[in-house]
Amino acid sequence: MNFILMFDTPISDFVVNVFPIIRLILLSIVTICCIVLIVTTLMQSSANQAGSSAISGGSSESYFSQNRDNTKDGKLKRITIWMASILAVCIVLYFITGFWLAI
């Protein structure tokens, strides 16, 4: 049995043997998410129509603005949100598993 230094309580062999593998998998997912997040952010168009219409007070309720999620920018925005969410969850899990291993 190994001991956590902070609490002097025994931890199981399952934690000692499996958590390093889980941490390696989480680190791989974080790396992949970071690369995808960077690429999708750079591929999005820089023109922000919502901000300019809010400043000028105009609203454009056209067919294009109603179906904006089906465009390339809408899909890239959705991918960016998903990758950022997965990244945040994996980082939290990575540090929680590190706490149990007392690394």
Image (cartoon, rainbow, N blue to C red):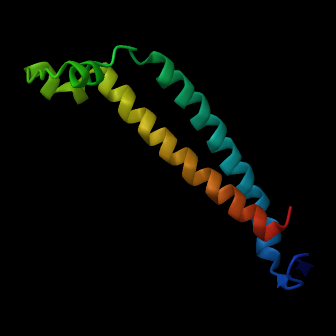
Task: Tell me if residue 35 comes above or below residue 21 in the rendering.
Answer: above
Total number of numbered discs in the rendering: 0
Q: Is residue 11 left or right of residue 76?
A: right
- Residue 48 lies, in percent from the top left, at 32, 19
Q: In this view, does 53 lie to the left or right of 8?
A: left
Quadrant of the image containing the N terminus: bottom right
- Residue 92 lies, in percent from the top left, at 63, 57
In the picture as drawn, the residue positioned furthest to the bottom comes out as: 9
Task: Tell me if residue 33 comes above or below residue 41 in the rendering.
Answer: below
**Residue for point 45% across, 16% down:** 43
Task: Tell me if residue 82 comes above or below residue 73 in the rendering.
Answer: below
**Residue for point 77% across, 72% down:** 15
Residue in the foreground of this view, choosing between 56 and 62: 56
- Residue 5 lies, in percent from the top left, at 91, 75
Quadrant of the image containing the C terminus: bottom right
**Residue for point 23% across, 25% down:** 54
In the picture as drawn, the residue positioned furthest to the left comes out as: 62
Q: Is residue 55 left or right of residue 11?
A: left
**Residue for point 12% across, 23% down:** 59
Residue 12, by quadrant, is bottom right
Q: Is residue 88 left or right of residue 64?
A: right
